Amino acid sequence: MLFLVDISFVNGYLDGMEIGSIIILLVGIVLGAVIVYLALTQRDKKLETGKSGMKDTFAALSMEALAKSSDQFLKLANETLKGQMEKGNANLEEKKKLIDANLEHMAVVVEDLKKQSILLSTQLSESQKETDKLRITTEDLRNVLSSSQARGQWGERMVEDILNLIGFVENVNFVKQKQVSSGERPDYTFYLPKDKTINMDVKFPLTHYERYIASDSEIEREHEQKMFLDDVKGHIRDVASRGYIDPLSGTVDYVLLFIPNESIYSFLHQTDPDLLKFALEKRIILCSPITLYAVLSLIHQAVGSFAMEEKAGQIMTLLREFEKQWLRFVASMEKMGRSIDATRSEFEKLTSTRTRQLEKPLTKIKEIELGRDGSDLLSSESDEPASPAE
């Protein structure tokens, strides 16, 4: 009974740690003792009554050996249990440290995920605001494209932005809605060197292009595309017939036609590559915002270069006049220098020879006043020949 209680106690503490090996050892000892006991009993029966004392003695010894084995087993089990518990405690401590470290790392990761979630939420909110602004802008653009007058104002606004970016000044580099000899009023007239001008029209047909974009049917899209290209060609013919080209009035041989959208400009070139050739045959230059910027920049540079060339000619004329007057100035300065040299020579004579000659009579007068005879001095002076300067 005591042995069974100890086994339960051991099982309670070991909690499954190497209990199988201990139970096998215990069962082996018990079975060995029982087998020995049974073998001896059978042998004692065969030896009959003479050996009963030896049987009892052996049984006692077996029980004593079994008791000692039980004590040694319990001692070994306790030592093993103690070692396993210490080892388990050490492992648990290491695992606790590892778990604590993982928890700290997870806390950092969770905090970082929290910050990223807040940032993502902010970005999503900003994106939603920008999307709303883009939607409003798209609706405004659609409203603009729905009216021909509004489309013209939109194109003029884009041209104004390009002109301001380049540095053009109204009534200096260009004029708006100025009547030409044919009676028409181009949207813009740009001034070129040598009193030349070039006219530009900013109105453009976009009705069928808008329908082409909004259409979902392939057949309808093809129809709207064809109608849009026909409108563009018709508009090119119309601009070519307005009398914007008049060399006798000082215009160049081409007219600028502004297309207020890069995507439309690319669409025209992709769908009808011959459209540019058709426009050039009508002396029309199609300009997108980027190409118009390039053309106007070239005009601005040409005007500046021509003005610089004119100013350079004026400067050269002034330099030649300056050189002529400078030579006269140098001749006058040299003449004045010679006069100054002669004057200086006469001045030196006045301050040296003539001064000494004037001082001698005064010296004699002073000697006469002091009672000295100066007749010999005067006679000697009267005998000296006079110089030509005297």
Image (spheres, rainbow, N blue to C red):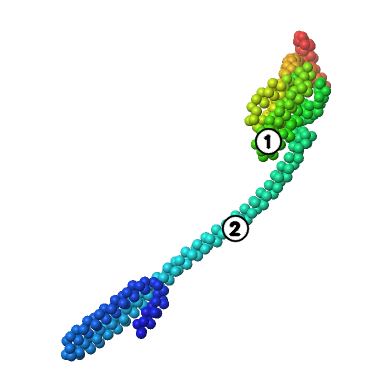
In the image, residue 102 sits, relative to residue 322, either above or below, namely: below
Q: Position of residue 179 (x, y in %)?
A: 82, 25
User: Position of 110 compared to 81: left or right?
Assistant: right
Residue at 66 percent of width and 30 percent of height: 268
| Residue designated by label 1 | 220
Q: Nearer the viewer, residue 250 or 11?
A: 11
Q: Quadrant of residue 151?
A: top right
**Can I make out residue 297 in this image?**
no
Residue at 25 percent of width and 84 percent of height: 62
| Residue designated by label 2 | 114
Furthest toward the front, the residue is: 219
Q: Quadrant of residue 380?
A: top right
Report the quarter where the C terminus lies: top right
User: Position of 286 compared to 74: left or right?
Assistant: right
Which amino acid type is marked by label 2?
Lys
In the image, residue 251 sits, relative to residue 153, either above or below, namely: above
The answer to which of marks 2 and 1 sits earlier in the sequence is 2
Q: Quadrant of residue 166?
A: top right
Residue at 60 percent of width and 55 percent of height: 116
Q: Position of residue 243 (x, y in %)?
A: 78, 21
Q: Secondary structure at mark 2?
A: helix
